[in-house]
Every structure is written in C-alpha cells, then in structure tokens.
Image (cartoon, grey):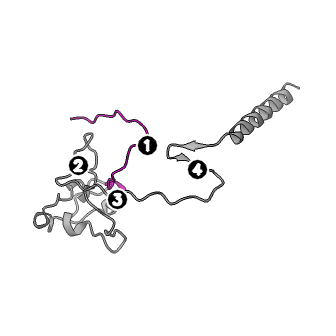
Amino acid sequence: MKKIMVTLTTALTVMIFNSISMAGAVESLRGFQDLMATSQEPSKKEDLVVKGGIERSYKQQPPVVPHKVDKDEINLKVNTCLNCHSEKTFEAKKAPKIGDSHFVDREGKVLNTLSSRRYFCNQCHAPQVNADPLVENTFEGAK
C-alpha cells in the first residue's frame, strides 16, 4: 500500500510540474523562441581581430585566435594554420610558433613532427567574435 501511495504521489507531482512548464513560455539566455517553431539561424557575429594577440586569462590557457579563420581549413589532409605557425614559417609570417608541447606524444616522447593529438588546432584554440555576453560576468583572469 505504501509503495502505491509513493508511486501515485510521484506521478501527480510530475503531472503538476509538466502542466506548469507547458503553460508558460520558455525563455533562454538568447531570448524568447517558441520551442515548437522552426529554429532560426543565429545572427552572424563579426570576427574579433586583435593585432599582437589576446592576453590569456589564466596560466596554461591555450591562446585564443586573434584573427579571422573563416577561410582556414583543417582536415586530415590540410591544416592551413601551419602556413603561418609552423617552425619553418612563423618568423617570416610574424606569427607565434607552435608550442613545444605540440611535438610530444602521449608517452612523453619528443617528436620531429606535430603530434597527431595536436593537429586539429580549433579543438583548443578558439576564434573570438564581437558579441555581448549572455550573462553578467565579473571574472578577472590571473595577471
């Protein structure tokens, strides 16, 4: 009997919360959009271009990308980031060189070529855009 009462109470609670949430509109951090409506393409943001790079917020942070990357290509055959950031070209292109950590495999062995684990740059190095924050942010990085 006690098991039946717990099950009925749980079911009633779920039904009440479902009806309350269905009655009100859902608003996300990006504003109101009906959940049943066709999704809308997000507005295009302008790439942030900062000459000299962007200061890191904390130690060991991968540097963020301070330039446009919309025409860059990274796949199994091509990595256009290496056109400027490789050991052979970085000085001529006046770009930061790939870090030494990118030439170490998972066992700690130093390699002559870029580690396959570090080949897809945009896994860690994110391009930036001019956009207002979605929520208030008072974070201050380590100086």
- Mark positioned earlier in the residue sequence (2 or 3): 2
Looking at the rendered structure, which numbered label has been put on residue 122?
3
Helix, strand or loop at disc 4?
A: loop
Q: Nearer the viewer, residue 14 or 104?
A: 14
Q: Mark 3 vs mark 4: which is more N-terminal?
A: 4
Q: Residue furthest left?
A: 92
Three-letter code, disc 1: Leu
Which residues fall within the magenta stretch?
122-143
**Relative to 132, is 67 on the left or the right?**
left
Cα separation, mark 1 vs mark 3, equals: 22 Å
Q: Nearer the viewer, residue 66 or 30?
A: 30
- Chief secondary structure of the magenta portion: loop
Asked if the residues shown at circle 4 and circle 2 are in contact, with their CB atoms under 8 angstroms apart, the answer is: no
What's the residue at 67%, 39% (across, down)? 24
Quarter of the view holding residue 67:
bottom left
* Amino acid under disc 3: Asn
* Tag 1 and tag 3, C-beta contact below 8 Å: no
Q: Position of residue 94 (x, y in %)?
A: 12, 62
Q: Which residue is mark 2?
A: 54
Task: State the residue lying farthest toward the top.
Answer: 2
In which quadrant of the rendered image does the N terminus lie? top right
The disc placed on residue 33 is 4
Please state if 97 lies on the left or on the right of 39 as rendered: left
